[in-house]
Image (cartoon, grey):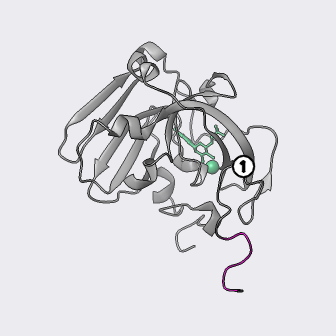
Amino acid sequence: MGILSPGFRGRRQATSQQLPPGQYLTEDFPVLSAGPTPRVPPESWELVVTTESGEQHRWSWADLTALPSETPTVDIHCVTKWSKLATTWRGVSVDVLMAEIETAADFALVQSYGGYTTNLPLEDLLDGKAWIAYEYDGAALAPEHGGPARLLVPHLYLWKSAKWVHGIQLSLEDEPGFWETAGYHDYGDPWREQRYQGD
Ligand SMILES: Nc1nc2c(c(=O)[nH]1)N[C@H]1C(S)=C(S)[C@@H](COP(=O)(O)O)O[C@H]1N2
Ligand SMILES: [Mo]
């Protein structure tokens, strides 16, 4: 014993009532946006997944909301050090979208209405770890929190959960997004406190 600190492994489940290192609890829901809130009416909202070969797969709002949804209850962790435990969302698992897509890509660059981008390994979007979320706490997702729909990837710092999600570019190579280019960590695991490059 003693190599792993208590709780380092085996307690990474949602709603573990444990906080990653350096985080504090908040009850309210802060808004963090790098620019103005884009107003995207659901009728004109679209999600486009583009594969490494340039093939595009599109979902309208009607398409998305007709797919089977899930209501994950998860903890969320912002790199500015607030965490919120047991938040409940509704959304479509990224697995459902990817089921119809053939790709050999290892990476995803997620693109938002308004120009924000963030990158992550494709595997971090799969196997029940990520959703295209369109409800929060039983109500339509508010525009300032990313409505009509945002990515939700709760096992990584929340900057990876792109609000107003519009596109996912799949690729063989990792391409840094907005905060990653500005010096934030490429991966962003809160349990390993990967806040900045070099952490
Ligand atoms: N499109 C877009 N998505 C974004 C951001 C942003 O500025 N633009 N900020 C990120 C950051 S740094 C955080 S902490 C969370 C904040 O989500 P919230 O405003 O719903 O709390 O959104 C992430 N997704
Ligand atoms: Mo953040």
At horizontal 43% and vertical 18% (from top left) the residue drawn is 66
44 or 8: nearer the eye? 8
- Residue type marked 1: Thr
Residue 171: percent from the left, percent from the top? 28, 52
Q: What is the magenta segment's predominant secondary structure?
A: loop
Q: Is residue 11 left or right of residue 180?
A: right
Furthest residue toward left? 53
The number of numbered badges drawn on the structure is: 1
Secondary-structure class at tag 1: loop
The magenta region covers 2-8
From this viewpoint, is residue 177 visible? Answer: no
Residue 110 lies, with reference to residue 197, above or below; the image says: above
At horizontal 72% and vertical 69% (from top left) the residue drawn is 7
Q: The N terminus appears in which quarter of the rendering?
A: bottom right
Q: The C terminus appears in which quarter of the rendering?
A: bottom right
Structural crowding at the residue carrying mark 1, measured as other residues with C-alpha within 10 Å and reported as few (<14), some (14–19) or many (≥20) = some
Q: Is residue 5 magenta?
A: yes
From this viewpoint, is residue 101 visible? Answer: yes
Residue 191 lies, with reference to residue 154, above or below; the image says: below
Residue 58: percent from the left, percent from the top? 30, 27
Q: Is residue 102 left or right of residue 75?
A: left
Residue at which label 1 appears = 15
